[in-house]
Amino acid sequence: MEISSSIKTYIRLAARVLGCTLVVMFALVAMQTQAHAAPAATLSIPVEQIFTGSDVQQERGFDYSLARLDASYPLPLGYVGDSYTFVLTGTGAQMIGPITFSNSGLYTYEIRSVETDSEELSVDSRIYTVIIAVRNTEGGFSAEIYAVYVQSSADSEKIKTDQIIFEKEDLRVLEDTDGEDPDPIPTPPPPGTITNDQRPSQGPKTGDYAEPLTMLLAMAISATLAFFALALIYMDRKGEKESEKIRELIMT
């Protein structure tokens, strides 16, 4: 009887330990399930296009590319390979996405125009680098744009910016219907050439071209020289008369 009581006691103790173990295991599984079931974060990227040109050109769409810099980064639905192509029409802003993130970390993307320059269209070649920060919060994940950098070419230096803006210009608005410049820039005349606009309204009657101010200045200088010449002659004659008077006084 004593042996059977001991066995029962051990069985009861083992059952309690097993029950506690199962409770802990179920709790851990529930916690992991809740962690994996945390809602993912979604984010859309604002991109603006400024178009200068005719209404006909603004009606067509222009292609852009959103490329991920790592194959593990998510992209919007409809992507091909490592890039997602979207279209902007006319002047305005559009939200590109959404992009769904299920893990925390930093995600880097590049946005650029797929169009190229042509005789009729000038295309903005700037490249935008977008860094998205995803954080794990109590209610799930949160995603936000951490920083945006822009560069005019692949070899230029990156500069931090606040907006993603692409500019396009229809070059045909600079020409008229005949293909000529409506406001042509006049070709300057060769050096030393005197045009009709440069001649004074009135000139000397002899037909020679001269500036009135220059002629007046020359006349003033001539009059001054003549005055000084007359003054010198007068002083010279006055001196001779005084010298004659002195000689007469001496002789007498």
Image (cartoon, rainbow, N blue to C red):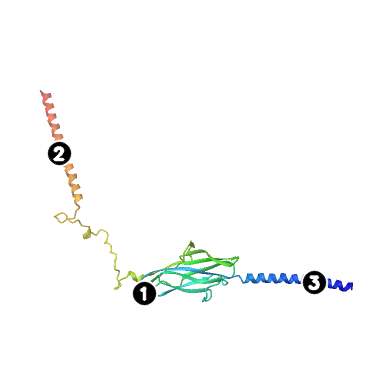
Please identify the quarter of the rendering in which residue 38 is found. Answer: bottom right
Q: Residues within 10 Å of mark 1 (few under 14, many from 20)?
A: few
Look at discs 2 and 3 and give the one toward the viewer: 3
- Measuring from the top left, give residue 61's x and y in whole percent: 42, 74
Closer to the camera in the image, 26 or 174: 26
Residue located at (13% from left, 34% from top) = 237
List the residue tagged with mark 2. 230
- Measuring from the top left, give residue 235's x and y in whole percent: 15, 34
Please identify the quarter of the rendering in which residue 190 is found. Answer: bottom left
Residue located at (11% from left, 27% from top) = 245
Closer to the camera in the image, 182 or 198: 182
List the residue tagged with mark 1. 56
State the CA–CA distance, disc 1 to disc 2. 85 Å
- Measuring from the top left, give residue 136's x and y in whole percent: 60, 66
Q: Amino acid at mark 2?
A: Leu
Q: Residue 151 shows which numbered tag? A: none
Which mark sits nearer the N-terminus, 1 or 2?
1
Look at discs 1 and 3 and give the one toward the viewer: 3
Q: Residue 14 shows which numbered tag? A: 3
Q: Amino acid at mark 3?
A: Ala
For this view, does 142 lie left or right of residue 234?
Answer: right
